[in-house]
Image: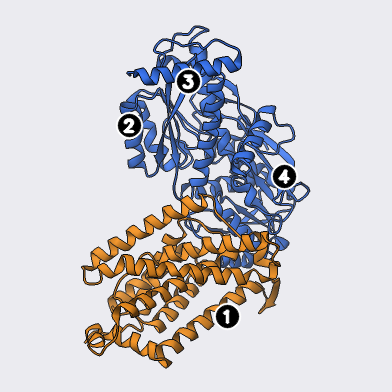
Chain colours: A orange, B blue
Amino acid sequence: MQKIFNLACGSFYALGAYVGVSAVQAFTAAGGPPWLFVVPLVVAGLGVGVVGVVVERGLLRYVYERDETFQLLLTFALVLMLEDVIRMVWGTSPRSTSGLYLAYGQVRLLGATVPVYNLIVVAASLVIALSIGWLLTRTAFGRIMRATADNRQMAEALGVDLRRVYARVFTLGTALGTLGGALVIPATAAMSEMGIELIVEAFAVVVIGGLGSMRGAFVGALVVGILRAVAISVFPEIEMLLIYLIVIAVLVLRPHGLFGAVPA
Amino acid sequence: MTTTRRQFLTLVGGAAAVGARLGAAPAFAQGGGPVKIGVLAIRAGIAAPVGAAGLRSTEWWAERTNKAGGILGRQVQLVVEEESNPKDTVERYRKLVLQDKVEVVIGGISTGVTLALGPVAEDLATPWLSWDGTTQKGVEETMPNPKWAFKSVDNEVEAIVAGMLTPKYFKGIKTVAGIGNDYSYGHDCWETYQAVLRRYVPDVKFVLELFPKLGVTDFTSHIASIQQSKADLLMCSFWSGDATIIMKQAAAVGLFKQMKGVFTTAGGVHDSLKKEFTPEGLLLGYNTMYFADPKGSPLLKQFVGDYKAKYNEYPPYECDHAYFNAESYKQAVEKAARGGKQWPDKAAVVKALEGIEVESLSAKRSWREDHVQMCNFYQGITTHKNGYDFVTIDPIEVVSTKQAMKPAGSKLMDWIKGWKV
């Protein structure tokens, strides 16, 4: 909506992961039951999303009208700074929530053993996607967001307070990023450079799905995830190559992605 | 090098205090100032914990050495620079030698970087002792006769040791899958492991090889592929946080209920391999130092105790490489001085380093005549029977580089083919 290519989204994801680990560790150290660990995880993941307000009001609002290269450089600087902040606060060693990943056990599903926590994350992702869809299409705020994304001058002329809308939307996006980082952490480990890893995949998702399209992001993420899994099983040598071949094909044949709006 | 009045007084005061504590008079060699030692340590990225361990160990060594009177009476001063990419690290190396005027540079972990440092060390005529980096291209040596560069053990030694131990602990293995990082170390370890295992189990089949790039944090698809391969055993050469992650994600789908596991280098992150998700019965490599070695020296026990007290962690192997580098330099200087107090020139120190054997944290270690480290490698079978919340190994296998590293001047695969198994 703000027409900013925000590289720092990966850093928000990493930040959510680290804060999530700390919250869960504090919870279990205080005697909290292991099966309730998702509560501090989700609360911490959403809570640290407030960093979005600081970044949007403190930095991004100054560059909305500037050249895209400047915006890219600024958000990349944020990536590097947040990586250093993470190292200063949490150190350089990977952080994990130990064996809590298996606190809910495993189930057999279509002949495969699947950790129940994975199903919880899949369900949470669907709930988030549906909620965002509802927010965008069924609420007044959603209509304002879409109108602003479509034509910010017109929206402003009609009385939309852009400052407030931008701050709220960016904070919402940041909170989703930090929540994503927190939710993924029980199955993996937090590492300071995990944000950069995510940016690369997010870039492929956005290009395939189409910039600015929620439906596109959903489908793009599915395409990238499934392609990676299939490539690893069938022909592991082309795992990354395959994704970027698709990215190139989309850029050449459908430059605005599968669901991106074609400018008039 | 000039010493200001204030620096001189500080040094005299510090040395006098140390001397008073030790009950010995402070001794100064000619020049009197501290001996500067350059240290290159990775501070960022996936190898940052390894770099931190090496630096911590070097600082521990420097503190002890200074308390005991320094080297030939000169206090040790560490000048720390960052190891990052080859170009920048070479610049920092030059700065250490030309601007900071260090007597020696120690450190270097990534072979991608140290491959570039080797020729620079030769050029600048200052000894360089590498913690963990080699000057190998693939598995072959590019600097067989260096004058100033001292390199770490060959990268593939832990894969060789694991290949030797696999048939001993996992009898009847017919099919093997492999996973390693998609860079030289991962590929070289896998190739070497296959070559060694074929010598012991000629009909073994290697059914799958996966090379995710460094830094990946989701291995669920890789694990599904490994399960599909129905291999009897998985060989994994991960050495950082990815080792912990794959272990956790493998446990979640019960991978090691289906197959055996060999983790050649995961001992580098040993205290993150929690019992909750790391099963017993895996072959686990600790590289050159096993922190809980029951036969470990008092030096090892003291180091582990101090490290735990200061950092609340148990030290990984990089500490041993770093300690050996620093201590071997100290002893080489003393050897070159022939009992006197005259500081030897750099060439004499290099000569003294060749073939020197010193007590390191793990055990006695030495520099081979072609400037490659000689030491022991520790691997064993994971167990939960200990007082920690992570796995340790029992039994412990100790294999010397005399047995598991190609001799100077030989080609790796020819050497392995020549074994009498």
In this rendering, the label closer to the viewer, 3 or 1: 3
Question: In percent of the image, x 47 and y 59: which residue is there?
Answer: A194
* Left or right, B71 with reference to B32: right
* Left or right, B395 with reference to B314: right
- For disc 2, the chain is B
Between marks 4 and 1, how big is the CA–CA gap? 39 Å
Residue A243: x and y, percent? 41, 70
- Secondary structure at numbered mark 2: helix
Residue A235: x and y, percent? 50, 66
The amino acid type found where label 4 is placed reads Ile
In this rendering, the label closer to the viewer, 4 or 3: 3
Q: Residue beneath label 1, please?
A: A123
Question: In percent of the image, x 51 and y 29: which residue is there?
Answer: B372
Of callouts 4 and 2, which one flags the residue occurring earlier in the amino acid sequence? 2
Q: Bin the neighbour count of mark 1 within 10 Å (Cα to Cα): few under 14, some 14-19, many 20 and up.
A: few
Work out whether B13 lies above or below A258: above
Q: Residue beneath label 2, please?
A: B94
Where does the C terminus of chain B fall, quadrant-wise? top right
Q: Residue B75 has which mark? A: 3
- Secondary structure at numbered mark 3: loop
Work out whether A80 lies above or below B287: below
The amino acid type found where label 3 is placed reads Gln
Of callouts 4 and 3, which one flags the residue occurring earlier in the amino acid sequence? 3
Q: Residue beneath label 4, please?
A: B393
Q: Is residue B407 visible?
A: no
Residue B317: x and y, percent? 59, 39
The amino acid type found where label 2 is placed reads Arg
Between marks 3 and 1, how big is the CA–CA gap? 62 Å
